[in-house]
Image: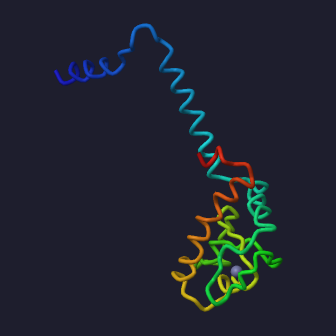
Amino acid sequence: MTLQRKTGLKRSGFVRKPGSPFSSFANRATAARRTTMKRRAKKPTVAEGSKYLAACRGEPCYLRVPGVCRLDPNDETVVPCHENSLAAGKGMGLKSNHARTVPGCFWCHVWLDQGPAERAVKQSVFLPAFDEWEPVRARKMGLQEVIA
Ligand SMILES: [Zn+2]
């Protein structure tokens, strides 16, 4: 009795709309392709990673730490500053995530990397800087379609 009921429910799940026998196959193929693209976007290659670093070149400082930054729009000391240099496990096998970088001048970089400020304070500088920088970087790298 139980078996019969199970079979009945199962069968109703396989009902196809008449006239479009291949629609479910097409949908599955599209979904698979989408999944692949997503996975690729999440795992940038080394070459893609260095593109993020290169994008920081010639940029002004985005960190603009109050009292630290010289706020020079033509600052030539700007380098990519990594978010995960803020992590507690720095230097313990953590890989640098080049995508999570922001252009920062020498002074802000030192403040972020080696400064005595608390991690939460550093995060409160890094995160808005990253929000500001990311769309600029995307435009610079011609990756608008990935963001959208
Ligand atoms: Zn700065």
Q: Position of residue 148 (x, y in %)?
A: 59, 45
1 versus 69 height, above or below: above
The percent coordinates of residue 94 (x first, y second) are 65, 71
Q: Residue furthest left?
A: 1
* Quarter of the view holding residue 85: bottom right
Question: Which quadrant contains ligand 1?
Answer: bottom right
Q: Out of 123 and 98, give the one closest to the viewer.
A: 123
Image quadrant where one finds the N terminus? top left
Q: Would you identify the image quadrant in which residue 14 lies?
A: top left
- In the rendered image, residue 107, in percent from the top left (x then y), is placed at 73, 86
Q: Is residue 9 above or below residue 38?
A: above
Q: Residue at x 26, y 22 (%)?
A: 9
**Along the horizontal axis of the image, is 126 left or right of 16?**
right
Q: What is the x, y in percent for residue 61?
A: 71, 75
Decide if residue 119 is on the left or right side of residue 7: right
Instruction: Specify the farthest residue to the right.
Output: 76
View extreme (top): residue: 19
Colour treatment of the image = rainbow
Please indicate whether residue 4 sits to the left or right of residue 44 in the image: left
> Closest to the observer: 131 or 16?
131
Q: Residue at 54% of width from left, 21% of height from top?
A: 26
The image quarter containing residue 52 is: bottom right
